[in-house]
């Protein structure tokens, strides 16, 4: 028995026939998703148009009904984009809000749109369309960031800085080389996003609630109309699969992890202790109490936001864990983490893409830092090997030479040839060229090495690859 007067909204009456009392007011709010899934509206309408065309094509709808549905959906879309659509919590979600409004506008033809379809295949389709577009924008922003990194690298192919291991000065590198390491990390992220996008690009429409439909649907037609690679191949899987959401969040978490590592370096480098780069004022904020402060807020926030993206990945994995086939209402919980992941990653990329090309490397401070930690000690060892010493012995000789420098507070290249020769008589005066920073980086001239020549070539290759995307 229905209670039309107690349950005023027509939509709840969709399943009202089975119910002997209206939904509890709190439960209605508790189970509703319209407040957040309205973000899927354009994709929902896109899916409905393709579904209606297909139904008309196979003779389930008349051409006139189909054209009415298109006209009605046009109006719904206009109302939504002009922000005058009357979203109702009583209509639960984006799908039923749109369908109910469509029916108000065009009458009975609106009620036929849901033939051979369920919200289960509908939401799965909407989400895939949304993710496909979201990944497109994220990839574009990622490419913009990479172009900025590669451009800065090309300009700094011979800018010297210390390379670190254990955050201790290890060997000299070029700033361009360091930046191209960032580029490599982000390249893998781009490929992961691309891979996720190609795997999600299949159309669940036609799976209906879980078992398919008795109507003579043409799944290839809807898949093609929506730009999918083809239809999904199992109806139970089609309505319950959220792998693509998890894959995206996993790719996003790794991307954020990379951005957090870059952030950490920028935070260190912009400190007075390092003083390697200047971050322009427009990307920084001051302190309300300490007038001298200029804080690297953008990298700090990006580093911090990595946590929420990691959290969303865990939320989605946990959401899907142990869910029996096929659709379960649990899945409604996929949207908020997914949307926040998309927004967070996009915003972080945008901030970085704007900031990176505006960084100013402080070349003399970088150079000075590279001179500090015996960064060319390995070069001295390599030199001794070339003169015939086994590497382990060379290592030992250089260790002693460094020990001498530490106690005399000097650098390797500050020693006289006579002093150097007390450590090994293999040392000649051709050693000094090898102990300079310039000599050290120039000597590492092979694919993937830090020599300015290699860095210039690597930056040119990277830029060319980015242009071809
Ligand atoms: N709002 C729902 C979701 O996000 C749509 C599908 C609901 N299906 C159902 N049978 N209750 O998952």
Image (cartoon, grey):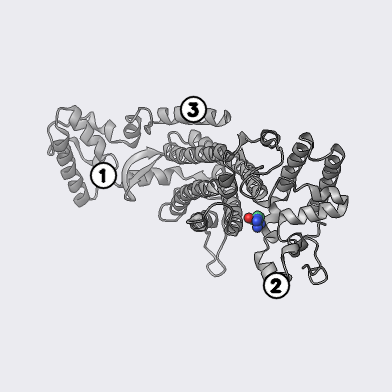
Q: Between 333 and 239, which is closer to the camera in this rendering?
A: 239
Q: Nearer the viewer, mark 3 or mark 1?
A: 3
Q: Percent x, y for residue 234?
A: 57, 41
Q: Answer with mark 3 or mark 2, whichever residue precedes in sequence.
A: 2
Disc number at residue 24? 2
* Number of on-image labels: 3
Which residue occupies 20% across, 38% down? 416
Q: Answer with mark 3 or mark 1, whichever residue precedes in sequence.
A: 1
Q: Percent x, y for residue 266?
A: 47, 50
Quarter the N terminus occupies: bottom right
Cα separation between marks 2 and 1: 79 Å
Q: Secondary structure at mark 3?
A: helix
Which residue occupies 27% across, 36% down? 435
Q: Which residue is mark 3?
A: 461
Q: Percent x, y for residue 233?
A: 57, 38
- The part of the image, by quadrant, that contains residue 23 is bottom right
Quarter the C terminus occupies: top right
Q: Is residue 190 left or right of residue 272?
A: right
Q: Secondary structure at mark 2?
A: loop
- Displayed-image quarter of ligand 1: bottom right
Q: Which residue is mark 1?
A: 411
């Amino acid at each position: 028995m229905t209670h039309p007067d107690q349950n005023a909204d027509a939509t709840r009456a969709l399943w009202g026939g089975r119910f002997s009392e209206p939904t509890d007011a709190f439960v209605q709010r508790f189970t509703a998703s319209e407040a957040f899934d309205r973000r899927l509206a354009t994709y929902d309408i896109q899916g409905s148009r393709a579904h209606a065309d297909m139904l008309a094509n196979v003779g389930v709808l008349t051409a006139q009904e189909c054209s009415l549905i298109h006209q009605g959906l046009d109006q719904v879309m206009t109302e939504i984009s002009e922000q005058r659509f009357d979203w109702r919590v009583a209509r639960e979600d984006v799908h039923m809000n749109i369908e109910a409004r469509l029916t108000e506008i065009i009458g009975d033809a609106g009620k036929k749109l849901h033939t051979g379809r369920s919200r289960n295949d509908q939401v799965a389709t909407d989400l895939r369309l949304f993710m496909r577009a979201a990944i497109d924008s994220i990839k574009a922003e990622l490419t913009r960031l990479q172009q900025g990194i590669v451009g800065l690298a090309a300009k700094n192919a011979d800018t010297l800085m210390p390379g670190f291991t254990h955050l201790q000065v290890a060997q000299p590198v070029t700033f361009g080389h360091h930046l191209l390491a960032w580029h490599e990390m982000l390249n893998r992220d781009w490929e992961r996003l691309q891979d996720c996008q190609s795997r999600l690009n299949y159309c669940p429409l036609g799976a209906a609630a879980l078992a398919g439909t008795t109507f003579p649907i043409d799944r290839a037609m809807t898949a093609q109309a929506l730009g999918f690679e083809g239809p999904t191949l199992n109806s139970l899987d089609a309505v319950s699969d959220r792998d693509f959401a998890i894959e995206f969040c996993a790719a996003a978490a790794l991307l954020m992890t990379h951005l957090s590592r870059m952030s950490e370096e920028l935070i260190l480098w912009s400190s007075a202790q390092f003083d390697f780069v200047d971050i322009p004022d427009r990307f920084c904020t001051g302190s309300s109490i300490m007038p001298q402060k200029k804080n690297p807020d953008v990298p700090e926030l990006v580093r911090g936001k990595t946590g929420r993206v990691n959290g969303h990945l865990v939320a989605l994995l946990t959401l899907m864990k142990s869910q029996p086939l096929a659709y379960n209402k649990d899945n409604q919980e996929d949207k908020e983490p997914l949307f926040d992941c998309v927004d967070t990653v996009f915003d972080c990329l945008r901030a970085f893409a704007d900031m990176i090309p505006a960084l100013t490397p402080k070349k003399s401070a970088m150079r000075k830092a590279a001179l500090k930690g015996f960064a060319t000690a390995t070069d001295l060892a390599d030199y001794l090997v070339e003169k015939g010493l086994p590497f382990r012995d060379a290592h030992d000789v250089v260790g002693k030479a460094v020990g001498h420098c530490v106690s005399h507070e000097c650098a390797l290249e500050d020693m006289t040839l006579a002093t150097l020769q007390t450590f090994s008589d293999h040392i000649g005066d051709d050693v000094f060229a090898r102990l300079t920073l310039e000599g050290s980086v120039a000597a590492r001239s092979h694919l993937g090495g830090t020599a300015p020549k290699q860095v210039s070539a690597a930056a040119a290759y990277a830029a060319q690859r980015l242009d071809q995307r």
